[in-house]
Image (cartoon, rainbow, N blue to C red):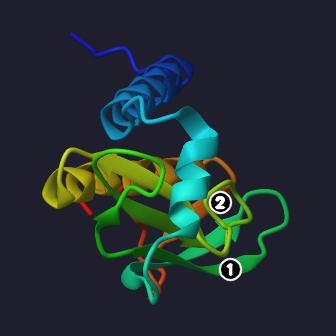
Amino acid sequence: MPIEDDKAAREAKLAEALRTNLRKRKAAARKDFGGEDAAAAAADAAPTPYNDVRNLLGITHGSGERRALTLSLSAPFPNPGGEGWAVAVRLSGDGGQFDTPSGKAAFGEDGLAALRKAIDLAQVAIDLASTTHALCWPDERPYDLSAPI
Protein backbone atom coordinates (compact mmCIF):
# COMPACT_ATOMS: atom_id res chain seq x y z
CA MET A 1 0.00 0.00 0.00
CA PRO A 2 1.58 3.34 -1.03
CA ILE A 3 2.13 6.00 1.59
CA GLU A 4 0.63 9.39 0.79
CA ASP A 5 3.18 12.16 0.66
CA ASP A 6 1.56 15.56 0.72
CA LYS A 7 4.41 18.08 0.85
CA ALA A 8 2.13 20.99 1.79
CA ALA A 9 0.68 19.03 4.73
CA ARG A 10 4.16 18.07 5.94
CA GLU A 11 5.35 21.68 5.73
CA ALA A 12 2.26 22.92 7.59
CA LYS A 13 2.85 20.37 10.37
CA LEU A 14 6.52 21.36 10.60
CA ALA A 15 5.65 25.07 10.76
CA GLU A 16 3.13 24.43 13.55
CA ALA A 17 5.67 22.32 15.45
CA LEU A 18 8.24 25.12 15.20
CA ARG A 19 5.70 27.72 16.41
CA THR A 20 4.71 25.49 19.33
CA ASN A 21 8.34 24.84 20.20
CA LEU A 22 9.09 28.58 20.05
CA ARG A 23 6.16 29.37 22.38
CA LYS A 24 7.30 26.72 24.86
CA ARG A 25 10.87 28.03 24.85
CA LYS A 26 9.72 31.63 25.32
CA ALA A 27 7.55 30.60 28.26
CA ALA A 28 10.38 28.61 29.84
CA ALA A 29 12.87 31.45 29.39
CA ARG A 30 10.85 34.21 30.97
CA LYS A 31 9.67 34.86 34.46
CA ASP A 32 7.71 37.84 35.65
CA PHE A 33 10.58 40.14 36.61
CA GLY A 34 9.07 43.18 34.90
CA GLY A 35 8.55 42.24 31.24
CA GLU A 36 10.44 42.97 28.04
CA ASP A 37 11.71 46.42 29.09
CA ALA A 38 13.16 44.93 32.27
CA ALA A 39 14.97 42.31 30.18
CA ALA A 40 16.60 44.97 28.01
CA ALA A 41 17.38 47.24 30.98
CA ALA A 42 18.91 44.40 32.99
CA ALA A 43 21.05 43.37 30.03
CA ASP A 44 22.54 46.88 30.00
CA ALA A 45 24.03 46.09 33.43
CA ALA A 46 25.57 42.79 32.31
CA PRO A 47 29.30 42.32 32.84
CA THR A 48 31.39 42.45 29.69
CA PRO A 49 32.85 40.92 27.67
CA TYR A 50 30.21 38.37 26.78
CA ASN A 51 31.23 34.80 26.05
CA ASP A 52 30.68 33.68 22.44
CA VAL A 53 28.94 30.31 22.54
CA ARG A 54 27.91 29.79 18.91
CA ASN A 55 29.15 31.15 15.57
CA LEU A 56 26.83 30.65 12.62
CA LEU A 57 26.41 31.79 9.04
CA GLY A 58 23.07 33.38 8.21
CA ILE A 59 21.95 33.57 4.59
CA THR A 60 19.13 36.09 4.17
CA HIS A 61 16.05 34.41 2.68
CA GLY A 62 15.21 37.25 0.31
CA SER A 63 18.52 38.48 -1.06
CA GLY A 64 20.91 35.62 -0.27
CA GLU A 65 23.20 37.99 1.62
CA ARG A 66 25.62 36.17 3.93
CA ARG A 67 26.07 37.38 7.49
CA ALA A 68 28.17 36.12 10.36
CA LEU A 69 25.94 35.53 13.40
CA THR A 70 27.41 35.29 16.88
CA LEU A 71 25.46 34.09 19.90
CA SER A 72 26.90 35.39 23.17
CA LEU A 73 26.02 35.02 26.85
CA SER A 74 27.15 37.14 29.77
CA ALA A 75 28.25 35.81 33.10
CA PRO A 76 25.46 35.63 35.71
CA PHE A 77 24.99 38.90 37.59
CA PRO A 78 22.62 40.19 40.28
CA ASN A 79 19.38 41.51 38.79
CA PRO A 80 19.74 45.30 38.95
CA GLY A 81 15.97 45.78 38.92
CA GLY A 82 15.11 43.60 41.88
CA GLU A 83 15.53 40.13 43.28
CA GLY A 84 17.29 37.18 41.72
CA TRP A 85 19.99 36.93 39.09
CA ALA A 86 20.21 37.53 35.36
CA VAL A 87 22.22 36.43 32.32
CA ALA A 88 22.26 38.52 29.13
CA VAL A 89 21.80 36.90 25.70
CA ARG A 90 22.91 38.61 22.49
CA LEU A 91 22.70 37.40 18.88
CA SER A 92 24.67 39.83 16.76
CA GLY A 93 24.55 40.04 12.98
CA ASP A 94 20.90 39.26 12.20
CA GLY A 95 19.36 42.68 12.91
CA GLY A 96 16.72 41.15 15.17
CA GLN A 97 15.56 42.04 18.66
CA PHE A 98 18.61 40.40 20.26
CA ASP A 99 21.04 42.30 18.00
CA THR A 100 21.71 45.20 20.36
CA PRO A 101 24.88 46.11 22.27
CA SER A 102 23.59 44.31 25.36
CA GLY A 103 20.84 41.96 24.09
CA LYS A 104 18.14 40.78 26.52
CA ALA A 105 18.35 39.20 29.94
CA ALA A 106 16.89 35.99 31.32
CA PHE A 107 16.15 35.87 35.04
CA GLY A 108 16.39 33.20 37.70
CA GLU A 109 16.36 32.70 41.45
CA ASP A 110 20.12 32.15 41.41
CA GLY A 111 22.95 32.26 38.87
CA LEU A 112 22.47 28.67 37.69
CA ALA A 113 18.71 29.09 37.20
CA ALA A 114 19.35 32.31 35.26
CA LEU A 115 21.93 30.54 33.09
CA ARG A 116 19.52 27.70 32.30
CA LYS A 117 16.82 30.19 31.31
CA ALA A 118 19.37 32.13 29.26
CA ILE A 119 20.16 28.98 27.29
CA ASP A 120 16.43 28.63 26.54
CA LEU A 121 16.30 32.30 25.58
CA ALA A 122 19.34 31.83 23.33
CA GLN A 123 17.45 29.08 21.53
CA VAL A 124 14.54 31.51 21.08
CA ALA A 125 16.95 34.05 19.55
CA ILE A 126 18.23 31.43 17.09
CA ASP A 127 14.67 30.29 16.28
CA LEU A 128 13.69 33.90 15.54
CA ALA A 129 16.78 34.39 13.36
CA SER A 130 15.81 31.30 11.38
CA THR A 131 12.63 33.06 10.22
CA THR A 132 14.69 35.61 8.26
CA HIS A 133 17.90 33.66 7.56
CA ALA A 134 18.86 30.17 6.48
CA LEU A 135 21.21 29.12 9.28
CA CYS A 136 24.42 27.22 8.60
CA TRP A 137 27.61 26.41 10.42
CA PRO A 138 30.57 28.55 9.26
CA ASP A 139 31.63 25.71 6.90
CA GLU A 140 28.11 25.91 5.33
CA ARG A 141 26.77 22.65 6.75
CA PRO A 142 23.07 23.14 7.57
CA TYR A 143 22.32 24.07 11.18
CA ASP A 144 19.81 21.85 12.98
CA LEU A 145 17.43 24.03 15.02
CA SER A 146 16.83 21.14 17.40
CA ALA A 147 20.55 21.01 18.28
CA PRO A 148 21.15 21.91 21.93
CA ILE A 149 23.12 25.05 22.73
- Examine the rendering and report whether any part of residue 96 can be seen: yes
The residue positioned 37% from the left and 14% from the top of the image is 4
Q: Is residue 82 above or below residue 134?
A: above
Q: Which amino acid does label 1 sit on?
A: Arg
Q: Camera-side residue: 31 or 10?
A: 31
Q: Is residue 11 above or below residue 131?
A: above
The residue positioned 24% from the left and 59% from the top of the image is 115
On the picture, is 133 further left or further right than 12? right
Q: What residue type is labelled 2?
A: His
The residue positioned 35% from the left and 27% from the top of the image is 24
**Residue carrying label 2:** 133
Q: At numbered mark 2, what does the secondary structure look like: helix, strand or loop?
A: strand
On the picture, is 3 further left or further right than 89? left
C-alpha span from label 2 to label 1: 9 Å
Q: Earlier in the sequence, mark 2 or mark 1?
A: 1
The residue positioned 43% from the left and 68% from the top of the image is 142
